[in-house]
Image (cartoon, rainbow, N blue to C red):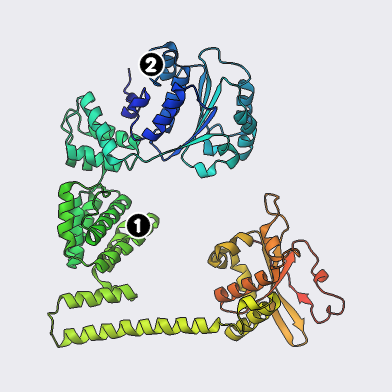
Amino acid sequence: MSYIALYRKFRPDTFDEVKGQEHIVTTLRNQVKSDRVGHAYLFCGTRGTGKTTMAKLLAKAVNCDNLQDGNPCCECESCKAIAAGNAMNVIEIDAASNSGVDNMRQIKEAVQYAPSQGKKLVYIIDEAHMLTREAFNALLKTLEEPPEYCLFILATTEDHKIPITIKSRCQKYDFHRISVETIYGRLKDLTEREGVDAETDALQFIARAGDGSMRDALSILDECIASRYNEKLTYDSVLEAVGAVDIEVYISLTEAIHTSSADEVLNLVNSAVWQGKDMVKYVDDYVWFMRNLLFIKLSPDSTSGMDLTRENVERIIKLSENYTREELTRYLTILQELSQAVRLSNIKRVTIEMSFIKMMHPETDKDFDSLVARIDKLEQGITPGASGAGGARIEELEGIVDEKIDSAVRTLERKIESMKVVAPVSDMSDGEISDNVKQLLKDRYEAAQYEEVLNFARLWKSNYYAKLNPISQRYLKDVDLEAGKEFTDSGELAVLNIIIPTRDREGKENMGYIYYLDKSNAKKDQNQMDLMDELAQIAGRRIKLNFREKNASVGAAYSTEEAFLNRIDFEDTVIKQ
């Protein structure tokens, strides 16, 4: 017989063998014992937490002929057939490859017939969030009132994608991430049963690497056993097998950065690259190391949730004594930015090295935190009462910091002053607020020229749309823009026409139309002025906006008397979004 992966070979056969989900085990076993099993269940949780395993156990329990305190006996024909995967009355469906409405219609037709063997007809739908909206709708009625012999179990890692109409018809259970201690206990038990000699540190590292997933941890263990076949499983061999980095490396790297030892930093990065380490994981692990170092600096007793061995905790506590909280916070901020940048970089090594240089040399940055770090660095190298060039340099840097703070305060004061209105907003009508906003825009921004408005329309999706606040983005996602000129008795004025459809792409009523154009919306004028203010802040120019329903006639917006003074020449400049 071919080899079976550990997570399949040791899949729990009874509720008692399930680890880390006691709150769900207790409930389901009590339902089985009291014959109060529901007709539909929704199992939610991250990967490898036992959703499919629990579904199969429940299917075995409801079909078992000889229950043992709510557990399946694993000896009757029904239990054996389900365990072997050839039971005719337990049907597993992968929603990722069977997501259409036709698949759900087949279920709807099949449930009309009672199972030929076993007590219950059980459907286990894995990755249920992959079903289409039409498939969910087709399943809805069957899920609400199935035959008494039918049981549905839906499993998903993304329960937010499950329609509320489905959730309301199911008993929902949330599977928790499994603790490191629980995973370690399971790994220790399985290695003993498999006859594998493994160090405690090695199993603890695998448990942490599992990241709350029992299946991930067992897969890593499988890989490590294969890499050291018939040998003792040691901590170093596990690090080599999974491509991880020892905490010793991160301690040395942090000390080298602190002492600005560029040669040592370069050698450590070079060593990781030539050992074939995953540089994204290398950075992510360093982020967690720095996070642990910062929290231990803040509170040496806060080590219970850090998944560290006692020896490593002691070493990190000793290491944290060499750093200030501000310094560690700055390090962690740079590493978080690096974690995102390294994923997008084509030259990961250079990206990592540049960030390490920023950590070593605060003078490469001109922001406030870097200036403070430079002052701290100088102060550490000068004894109290020292004078001369060092003291003068500190005074110079402190002066720069004070100047930046004063400049920021003055800018904020000017901004607050410019936003002041003549009367409290609560005492003003919508018309008065609109007039006030218009006056503020006129005072603060120059009117946009036609070429500027045309360029704004062209760069709308690629540049300006992303700078809007989330509410404006939601209401303006389906609009078209027109740049044009409006001729008045005072001269030519550039305008931006915002064309809003009454229906969105799914045929539903467009929220943007209601927000900006619907006459029944008493706040539409104020909403238009708010958008004008927002666009002025983004573009740095005052842009006059005209709002129009899509497919409506341009001329219809102007009366006969106004036609001459308010002609709009759009010159074929429609920008389709």
Quadrant of res 209: top left
Give left or right: position of 230 versus 19.
left
Say left or right for 485 vs 414.
right
Q: Residues within 10 Å of mark 1 (few under 14, many from 20)?
A: many
| Gap between marks 1 and 2 measured at Cα | 50 Å
Could you tell which of marks 1 and 2 lies nearer the N-terminus? 2
Q: What's the mark number on residue 339?
A: 1
Q: Which residue is mark 2?
A: 73
Amino acid type, residue under disc 1 in the picture: Ser
Residue 245: image location, x then y, percent: 23, 49
Measuring 29% from the left and 77% from the top, which residue is drawn there? Answer: 371
The residue under label 2 is which amino acid type? Cys
Percent position (x, y) of residue 200? 18, 37
| In the rendered image, the vertical position of residue 391 relative to residue 102, given as above or below | below
**In the image: residue 525, left or right of residue 325:** right
| Residue 414 image position (x, y, % from top left) | 49, 84
Instruction: Confirm whether residue 365 shows in the render.
Output: no
Image position of 188 with respect to 375: above or below: above
> Secondary structure under badge 2?
loop
